[in-house]
Amino acid sequence: MATIHEKTTEAAALALEVDGDGIAWLTFDRRGSRVNLLTTPVMSRLDALLGAVEEGARAGRIRALIVQSGKPGTFIAGADVEEIGRVRDAAEGTAKSRQGQRIFRRLELLTIPTMAAIDGVCLGGGTELALACRNRLASDRADTRIGLPEVRLGILPGFGGTVRLPRLLGLRAALELIVSGKPISARRALRIGLVDEVVPTTMLRDRVKHFARERIEKRHVTRRKRPALTRLLERTPPGRRLLLQLARRQVRKETGGNYPAPLAAIDTLSRTVGRPLDPAFELEARTLGELIATDVCKNLVHVFRLTESAKKAGPLLEPRSVDVVGVLGAGVMGGGIAQLLAYHGLGVRLKDVQARAIGQALHHARELFDAAVRRGRLERRAAEEAFGRIAPTLDYSGFARVDVVIEAVVERMEVKQQVLHEVEARVASGGVLTSNTSSLSIQEMQKALERPADFCGMHFFNPVERMPLVEVVRAPDTSDGAVATIFALARRLGKTPLEVKDGPGFLVNRLLGPYLNEAGWLLADGASIEAIDRALTAFGMPMGPLRLLDEIGLDVAAHAAGVMHEALGERFRPALPLLALRRTARLGRKGGRGFYRYEGGKSKEADAAIYAELRDSVPASRRELPRALIQERTVLAMVNEAARALEDGIVGRAADVDLAMILGTGFPPFRGGLLRYADALGLPAILGKLGAFERERGPRFQPAPLLRERAVAGRGFYD
Ligand code: 3H9
């Protein structure tokens, strides 16, 4: 092969070679990195190499172009997110987009056959590059995921993606990919016509070469997809309007209008589909410019960084190997954890003292596996096999072979100490014991153990299969080896582990405590259930605090609140309406009645009868409190507690708090995280508000020393 351009700089992530058949291979291979990126230098080099290809094509030396990656399992991960984070100005963003569009247009206009060989992740600008090729072939490996995740960064595809994708796939499929930002598998890409062929990974290179030859010899006739019914709908302007309207409605419902990018993407498509190319590219570039300069974009880039750094966190120690996990307690959490473990290929011994609890847990696990099959995530046979990996037991048989134990029995210290002590005697040395407690002291449990170094907290959130965070709780005697093993296990389960120091409520529940409690105080001030919950969903929380209490279970929440009140003092004193609630029979969703009514598992409206039951602690009638006040009281209570948790060293950095709150409570990513939001408000302003609340409402709002210090020094949580 002849190399046309020598590799010289960082941009030499890109090489062009021409083989004996006149096929040019454009290979992306960023040195020292797991992924290929379309950084500005790489784009410039691509531009130059396309010039060389044009020349070669004119001279008859180059007869086809194949775009590929030199990294197995990764095609191109798109533009550089760090560069996106640095753009502050709309004009600069628009210029970046125009530049990329121009280069990809150059690729599109080549007179020779062009094709992308996609093996592994292909995202954002990577997908847009592939779209500028005439054909796309993809490998069948599981890692091959193709998508346009730009809206997740608060922007839209800006290298021609919004223009080319609907032209290739039709409006409906394009909307789905661009607006959801979710990547799809190679098989699905084939079904919708995004790629032309899916090939076994080992054959991709040969097949794409053969494909190029066929194209050169014009042997291969392009197969046109026959228009499906939905594409007929798209042909008419009213049909297109309907699709766009439905998409807008769906986005508003899912995001509360807090994310401008998906709506801007829909608007862009509504004005460009079926219209000439040039103004379409121009509108895409201008819209990208507007979006890239927003705070939402910067906040989402910040969240990307948080999740990226979480992938590397944890002790740098080899984890112990884990094949079988013992789960103690087959309640909601234990059962959920057992299902998750089995789903991810681990063997599970699920122990409870009651056969009925085990029966219920297995029933629930079966439902979750069935749902996974229905949603196409798992083949029926694989689901059966996974379900079969859960071995129920009423005693400790089989525990000699478990590598890790996750204790999830009732939240009572003496019971936990007892079962941990029992199980420790059965597990081989080297096994790691953990507790899924949500608020009890890990250090206290350690006292019951012979090998305290092999013990830590492993705190999952409910519902286990959906919540991405696991708090790995380290007590003073916990060893790095135990933490490393639990980090690796959590990652294997698809979760993000975060190391937290032992302390009441650890991190997430400790911060939720004052937030939920303040919702109780707001009830005492006469706010309605709906007003409180709506204020917080409008803020961006996935559900309001009172609905969240219903989900957690009012008895469980009351217990955790009691533990934290005892340990953390006065500011955690439960609000009177929440105390009064304990005297009612309400349990929240699981009991059919809480702040809301539930029928057949479905949530109904708020239950007005509750006000009469709490009449000693809430006024006889509701009064309207300003939405902003409800948001400030609840959210600033969390910010203040976060400052105290940092002081106590529960976690070391503001970034840890933000990651935990986003993954553990669904704190709105568009705000960048709790403490990034606080920094944006400004600590002096927060200090002023807390001071005023303290005067009006009492010492629970007393500003944390760390917050005060930083405010006075003109620093934020992140500085
Ligand atoms: C775009 O394309 C915009 C255009 O339409 C228009 C612009 C005008 N940028 O995650 P990993 C780093 S928007 C910068 O550990 P994995 C990552 O931080 C872009 N860095 O591997 C890490 O760095 P380090 C749309 C990136 O296998 C290293 O690569 N694209 C980027 O678990 C390895 O990554 C996206 O949003 C990036 N684009 O996951 C894709 N991608 O080693 C975002 C990766 O220093 N990326 N890095 O810690 C991802 O989703 C995942 O990283 C990916 C790989 C699935 C690719």
Image (cartoon, rainbow, N blue to C red):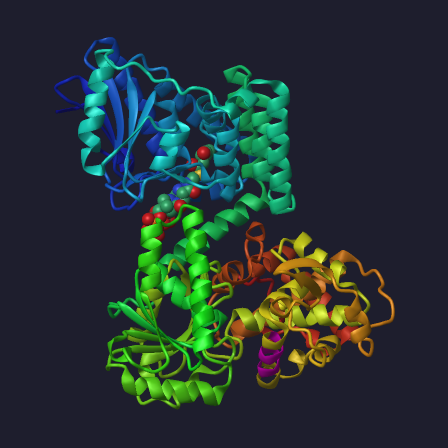
Q: Classify residue 426 by image quadrant.
A: bottom left
> Is 542 a magenta residue?
no
Q: Is residue 281 among what the camera can see?
A: yes
Please tell me which residue lies in front, 3 or 608. 608
Which residue extends farthest top? 59
Q: Quadrant of the N terminus?
A: top left
Rendering coords of residue 355 (x, y %): 43, 77
Residue occupying image coordinates x 48% and y 60%: 467
Which residue extends farthest right? 620
Name the dominant secondary structure of the magenta segment: helix
Please tell me which residue lies in front, 97 or 617. 617
- Compared with 82, 680 (above or below) is below
Q: Classify residue 404 by image quadrant.
A: bottom left
Q: How many numbered marks, from 0 up?
A: 0
Rendering coords of residue 242 (x, y %): 63, 28
Q: Is residue 658 left or right of residue 141?
A: right
- Compared with 277, 453 (above or below) is below
Q: Is residue 516 left or right of residue 156?
A: right
Q: From which residue to which does the magenta span run?
A: 557-563
Q: Classify residue 237 by image quadrant.
A: top right
- Compared with 157, 489 (above or below) is below
Residue occupying image coordinates x 55% and y 16%: 275
Rendering coords of residue 157 (x, y %): 48, 33
Q: Quadrant of ligand 1?
A: top left
Residue occupying image coordinates x 29% and y 79%: 399
Rendering coords of residue 539 (x, y %): 66, 54
Q: Is residue 557 left or right of residue 437?
A: right
> Is 558 a magenta residue?
yes
Q: Is residue 719 among what the camera can see?
A: no
